[in-house]
Image (spheres, rainbow, N blue to C red):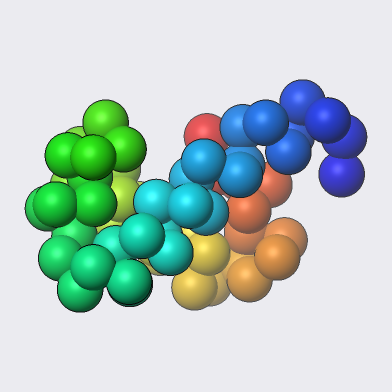
Amino acid sequence: MTTYQEKIIKPRIGLLKLAEQLGNVSQACKVMGYSRDTFYRYKELHDQGGERGKLYMR
């Protein structure tokens, strides 16, 4: 994975992890500056593709 991909993907994975830690998607999205729709799109891509799915999280 390139540095560019890491810079893009890391915060998105952080969003998923924060939501899990907080147990509250809305609060995690507010803290990270993402919409809930975006969260669920990233979550679906991650769940479907695992590590490979991260590459499509745009």
Residue 7 as seen in the image, left or right of residue 38: right
At 63% from the left and 53% from the top, the residue drawn is: 54
Image quadrant where residue 9 sits: top right
Residue 49 as seen in the image, left or right of residue 12: right
Pick the front one: 14 or 2: 14
Position of residue 45 measured from the top left corner of the image (x, y, whole percent): 49, 59
Figure disc tally: 0
Res. 18 visible in picture: yes
Residue 30 as seen in the image, left or right of residue 3: left
| Above/below status of 40 relative to 12 | below
Pick the front one: 45 or 6: 6
Image quadrant where residue 16 sits: bottom left
Image quarter where the N terminus lies is: top right
At 87% from the left and 34% from the top, the residue drawn is: 2
Q: Residue furthest top?
A: 4
| Above/below status of 32 relative to 18 | above
| Above/below status of 18 relative to 30 | below
Image quadrant where residue 25 sits: bottom left
Position of residue 48 measured from the top left corner of the image (x, y, whole percent): 53, 72
Residue 32 as seen in the image, left or right of residue 54: left
